[in-house]
Amino acid sequence: MTPQLCARLTRTDLVMTTRARVTLVSSQLRRAAIALALLGASACHGSSPHAAGAGPSPRGSKRTVIVLGFDGFARRYLDADSAPALHALARSGVTARGMIPSFPTITFPNFYALATGLYPDHSGIVNNRFFDPAHDSAFEYKKPVAHEAYWWGGEPIWVTATKQGAPAATMFWVGSDAPVGGVRPELWHSYDHAVQFSARVDTLLAWLDLPASQRPRLLMGYFEEPDMQGHRHGPDSPETHQAVLRVDSALAQLVSGLQARKLYESVDIVIVADHGMAQISPEQVVYLDDVVDSASVDVVTMAPNLSIRARDGDNDALLGKLRKLPHVTVWKKADVPARLHYGTSARITPIVAVTDPGWMIAWRHGKPLDLLGEHGYDNANPDMHALFLAHGPDFKAGTTIDDFPNIDVYDLLARLLGVTPAPNDGTLAPFAAVLR
Ligand SMILES: [Zn+2]
């Protein structure tokens, strides 16, 4: 993907109604926001749920589950930063040593892997940008075309919940702008970068103030930091530290709001990130035009994940040229290592490559590298490992679990909600010792 564009959509992408957007304006207007959220419930209503109560829940749970997604929150930030709200949550909840993102370690594939339990190769969201031969159409994550349902495979947790009678609400989440399988969350907002983090939390809390008959049991909120600052200034910069504190403040606001409502001890909170962040430098760039003519190839994504095909169809010849590049590992799609679970989707280019940690690929005639942080590297790289925290009545306090793949989060959310998960690539096993 183009690195600096990690999940930044524009106002032109919005489909949110004016009335619903008013619910996001300010915390000072909370009372009004609650009233308007009630109205917004109809303005932003999803399509009708499918048959409710499909199968018994594993535990008959009626738990409310809140999921926060912090873009680009590397696991190691938790150790390096003060982040008081996150550490307080960890002390009385569950922390993972690291959550391993799916390959490629890019935003859209991973937030959707978290939501569906499917590897990107299986969900269809194989990168932030890709081409679908069946639809003769290009997915572009920041354009309205991404709101079409046909891109999004599997069953995201908000659909699973809705179909089984647990209302869901999304305050921005990758995939929730599309009616996946014909189902939208009961309440949802299309991504708007301009909405302050505090207003996003206000909206989540306002949804909890809805009458019981309308109140969601699954609430999901997305925050685009610390990814943006991590890209611009590097993972270890003061600016990224400040961005960590911004999302920490959002969590503190949520916890405070839950405590005021006497809900803090009765809801489950799960905090996830899509990937980590690695330091990069202008000195660590390899140039594609040193081995191939730019007119001879189609490049779908560039760095650190190169998605490329030969225009003349001779991908074997292209493979040979690309293998001359230093600091780059190149595969035919069928030969991507099994551990990366990547390479069967028709949406993946015939050749994929990934750079060594800290290295980038560029065109010599392209614009100079103006970033200091990047992700997209091999998911075995600890810098790519993501934050996972969980807290609530279903979790044993003060516990730690080993590294686990992020496709396991979907089964966890289904378990907490008491709904039956759709078929997926994940398992509950990583959480067996810490669930009550
Ligand atoms: Zn991201």
Image (cartoon, grey):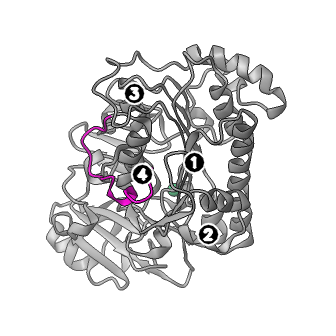
Q: In the drawing, does residue 193 fall left or right of residue 1?
A: right
Precedes in sequence: disc 2 or disc 3: 2
Residue 200: % across, % down: 67, 38
Q: 257 or 237: which is nearer to us?
A: 257
The answer for how far apart the CA atoms under marks 3 and 1 are is 20 Å
Number of residues whose C-alpha sits closer than 10 Å to that of mark 1, classed few (under 14), some (14–19) or many (20 or more) = some
Q: Quadrant of the N terminus?
A: bottom left
Amino acid type shown at disc 2: Tyr
The boundaries of the magenta stretch are 420-436
x 36%, y 53%: residue: 408
Precedes in sequence: disc 1 or disc 4: 1
Regarding mark 2 in the picture, which secondary structure is present there? helix
Q: In the drawing, does residue 384 fall left or right of residue 249?
A: left
The mark lying in front, picked from 3 and 1, is 3
x 55%, y 32%: residue: 190
399 over 143 or under it: above or below: below
Regarding mark 3 in the picture, which secondary structure is present there? loop
Precedes in sequence: disc 4 or disc 3: 4
The residue identified by callout 3 is 179
The residue identified by callout 4 is 128
